[in-house]
Amino acid sequence: NLYPQKVDLTNCDKEPIHKLNRVQLFGFILVVDIKNFTISQYSTNISDFISFDKTYLNEDVSAIIGEKLSNLIMEGLNNNDLGPYEYVSEKGEHFLINPNVSNEHLILEFEPIKESIDAIAQQQQLTQIITKLDNAKDEMEMCDMTAQMVKDFLGYDRVMIYQFDENWNGQVVSEAREPHLESWLGLHYPATDIPQQARKLFMSQGVRLISEVTREAATFEPELSPLSNDILDMSKSELRAPSLIHVEYLENMKVKGTLTAAIVYNNTLWGLIACHHYSPKILSYHKRLSVKFLTQVFSTQLGLRSFNSSLKKVNESSIIRSKLVKQMSINWNIVEGLSGYDTNLIGLTEAKGAAIIMDGETTLIGQTPSVIQIENLKQWLLSEISENDIFYTNKLSSMYAEGFEYKEVASGVLALLLNKGTNALFWFKPEQLQVVDWGGNPNKPAEIGSEARLSPRKSFEKWSENVEGESLPWLDYEISAAKALKDSISEIIIQKYDEVMRLNQ
Ligand code: BLA
């Protein structure tokens, strides 16, 4: 049995989706032995495109594509510059050959060329898009513009910008769609919709076209590669057909054709541009390449903008810290310096409240729990974290039961313990009540299908969930600001000590 594994929800993240022996029908494949350029396998739909029969197996590939092209590809292989190439068949039909290397195989992927490319017009269009992106006022506007421009450029029925969170759940943050379609803006999808191996493969590919959502696919003749005695690894193939689980998923969404582009920066998958069409849709290789380029520009811009806006926050916060240090130095009084002026401890972060426990006294600023509740929290922290450490959470009540009593003001806590916990600083963020709209019930990711096997969720109706006891997260700059303040306070304490010693002399 070639495919021993039965795929269900418990193991679908282990499905070898790069080795399913399934080829999409909008093109065909010749697999060539990289050592001697003989044909070792072909996709079973080849006769839909060119005249071919079994006898070509083990023949030199030039028997099909001609001596000239064969030499050109061989040269490209040696120079690490693999096309694409144009090929004209016996019948005079034009194809693009898109080669990729998979171990000892050279995989030649053929796609019919349907439209003539107006390179200049396409370049102008791209330049316009990039200029527009440059002028977007913030990240949100950039996402909205990109969704609309990709829709205009490619002509899909729906284009979404989809952003991952830290647990690989995702949310539709921008959308452009045909007016008769219902909006999916703001909908959430659970991480299981895109298993980890699919994310990895997708990220390295960049752009993925599924021209027709169908269970039908071509396979290879022979099924196993005679070179490796194994199923061909199609990780780099554009014509790789999707896993049947994913097909079922898209069928349930009533989608007939998709294009997905990975938004990557800092080597991580930030999100994706997801294009849906309600009828099959083939997009030429050149258009796909343009989308890849566009998505790269978009990703870089996005990264740059978020870097700049967090840099701005870091700068503002460090100005506030030096003010606090100055204030603390006036009378060598830490509590007064942190709480007695217009600029106080809260401003260092985006918290709404803060507390200072210093020499047995507790000082409160803004929205906080009570003095006793904060003292209890400190005792709990002492048992939880080492005495001079920093602690933060945006879901206090999920780990500390008493926190539930004051989750409205302090679902988020950032705490610094000083001098073995005799002194402490706290910042508090209020509960951020939110309704999360899931595109389907996330706790019920699959249903038993008619064939008594698991299938992806059938319901994409809006499914709402209340998230309780959570604040906005603590950002990196807020945590760094707290750490830096701690160092400043230690210095002030040492200076104060020196000062006292000097006066006493
Ligand atoms: C792949 N699932 C994907 C991909 C996306 C999604 C974007 C990768 C791109 C692609 O191959 O087309 C999910 N698409 C979405 C989501 C939206 C969208 C969330 O447009 C939102 C608007 N899928 C499931 C479950 C499993 C599963 C339960 O829902 C597994 C049990 C599997 N998803 C699955 C697999 C792939 C996939 C196997 C890879 C398909 C392949 O490349 O062969």
Image (spheres, rainbow, N blue to C red):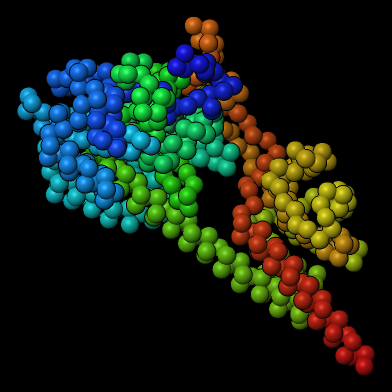
Q: Quadrant of residue 427?
A: bottom right
Relative height, residue 462 to residue 208 (above, below)? above
Instruction: Give the image location of residue 235, x and y in percent.
Output: 39, 34
* Along the viewing direction, whichever of 55 and 364 lies nearer the viewer: 55
* 504 relative position to 443: left or right: right
At horizontal 36% and vertical 28% (from top left) the residue drawn is: 227
At horizontal 28% and vertical 29% (from top left) the residue drawn is: 31
* Along the viewing direction, whichever of 265 and 428 lies nearer the viewer: 265
- Tally of numbered discs: 0
Instruction: Give the image location of residue 93, x and y in percent.
Output: 10, 28
Whether residue 27 appears in this view of the structure is no
In the rendered image, the residue lying farthest to the bottom is: 505
* Along the viewing direction, whichever of 274 and 46 lies nearer the viewer: 46
At horizontal 74% and vertical 70% (from top left) the residue drawn is: 487
Instruction: Give the image location of residue 16, x and y in percent.
Output: 47, 27
At horizontal 27% and vertical 48% (from top left) the residue drawn is: 78
Relative height, residue 281 to residue 477 (above, below)? above
Instruction: Give the image location of residue 238, x and y in percent.
Output: 31, 33
